[in-house]
Amino acid sequence: MQVAGIPLLTAVACIYFGIKVMVFKDTDSIRGSMAKELRDKESYAKYAGTLLFVFALCSLVMAVLLFFNTVAAAVEISISLVAVMAAWAQIEKKFGSD
């Protein structure tokens, strides 16, 4: 179980912030209190929360893969991270501040 500790902790953190953003609309917890005002806070919270849940799922998949093949786990999380970063940039572009 020690092998999968970091991916599991990452998944828990993503789920926590996903709930915080999606349910409570607390976008300041991920953007910071000094960030500019969002154009559409409701949509931003919906999509950002969903994206956090997707990354939590990717982290859980990595935790499982670590027990079988560490290279596959590293490749999976690398691809997932690039995809999530690209999606996050699109969310910021669409709903973020000007």
Image (spheres, helix red, strand yellow):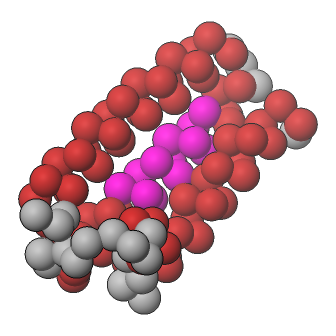
Residue 19, horizontal then vertical, whole percent: 49, 76
Residue 83 sits above or below residue 94 on the image:
above
Tell me what residue is drawn at x 52 percent, y 69 percent.
17
Q: Position of residue 75 (x, y in %)?
A: 51, 17
The answer to which of 17 and 66 lies nearer the viewer is 17
Q: Quadrant of residue 61?
A: top right
Residue 25 lies, in percent from the top left, at 36, 84
User: Which residue is at the far bottom?
Assistant: 24
Residue 35 in sight here: yes
Seen at 68% across and 36% down, the residue is 63
Task: Tell whether position 69 is magenta.
Answer: no
Q: Main secondary structure of the magenta part?
A: helix
Viewer-nearest residue: 57 or 20:
20
Left/right of residue 80 with respect to residue 65 in the rendered view: left
User: Residue 21 versus residue 63: which sits nearer the camera?
Assistant: 21
Looking at this rendering, what residue extends furthest in the front direction? Answer: 34
Tell me which corner region of the image, top left, top right, bottom left or bottom right, holds residue 84: top left
Vertical order, 34 against 10 (above or below): below
Q: Quadrant of the N terminus?
A: top right
What's drawn in magenta, residue-wise?
A: 51-62
Q: Is residue 98 above or below residue 80?
A: below
Task: Classify the position of the C terminus by image quarter.
Answer: bottom left
Residue drawn at point x = 32 percent, y = 63 percent = 48
Would residue 91 be found to the left or right of residue 66 on screen? left
Residue that appears at 89% across and 37% down: 2
Q: Is residue 59 magenta?
A: yes
